[in-house]
Image (cartoon, rainbow, N blue to C red):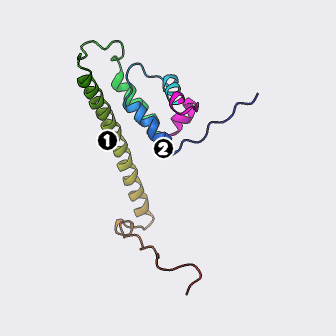
Amino acid sequence: MKKTRAPDLTDERIKLVLDTLDGWKGKLTWDLLIEAIQKITGITYSRFTFAEYPEIANAFSLRKEALRGTWKGERGQPRDERVRAALEQVERYKAKIERLEEQNQLLLEQFVTWAHNAERKGVTVMMLNAPLPKPERDRTKGVK
């Protein structure tokens, strides 16, 4: 029987994967991530599908690096559930900040590349920074 293809990753599903990685605790592998996303969405994606999206691949690598050596035990956790939940939320936010800072750096590098290539083709930074034209909302189709 032919295996059916998983639906494309939408922006919403990519955000779900990134949020899942930001809050990840314990050992992290592609298989575990795939299983976690399957439990949430009911869709089984492949490692290769996730790896095709740079934001997912980068977030996975960053989170894996951050978790390296920390998944073997959770000793020293506070007893108060509210404090523990707050600390977990802080960890999620820290992971998200780290991922977004890395993503921002990649976008800045991409912008520099684009600006350089545009300049080589005669497009100036001033031309690139020109405001977009205003949409013609008052006009209706066919009316002159």
Q: In the picture, which quadrant includes the C terminus?
A: bottom right
Task: Return the residue at label 2.
Answer: 12
| In the image, residue 107 above or below residue 121 | above
Residue 70 is left or right of residue 35, and the answer is: left
Name the residue type under label 1: Glu
Instruction: State which region is magenta.
Output: 38-53
Main secondary-structure element of the magenta-colored stretch: helix
Number of the front mark, 1 or 2: 2
The kind of residue on which mark 2 rests is Glu
Q: Is residue 71 above or below residue 55?
A: above
Counting from the top left corner in percent of width and height, residue 10 is at 53, 44
Residue at screen point 43% across, 58% down: 117
Image quadrant assignment for residue 103: top left
- Residue shown at 33% from the left, 17% from the top: 70
* Above or below 87: residue 141: below
* Helix, strand or loop status at disc 2: helix
Where disc 1 sits, the SS reads helix
Residue 87 at x, y percent in the picture: 25, 26
Q: In the shown orientation, is residue 134 left or right of residue 86?
A: right
Whether 84 is among the magenta residues is no
Q: Does residue 68 sit above or below 144 in this rendering?
A: above
Marker disc for residue 101: 1
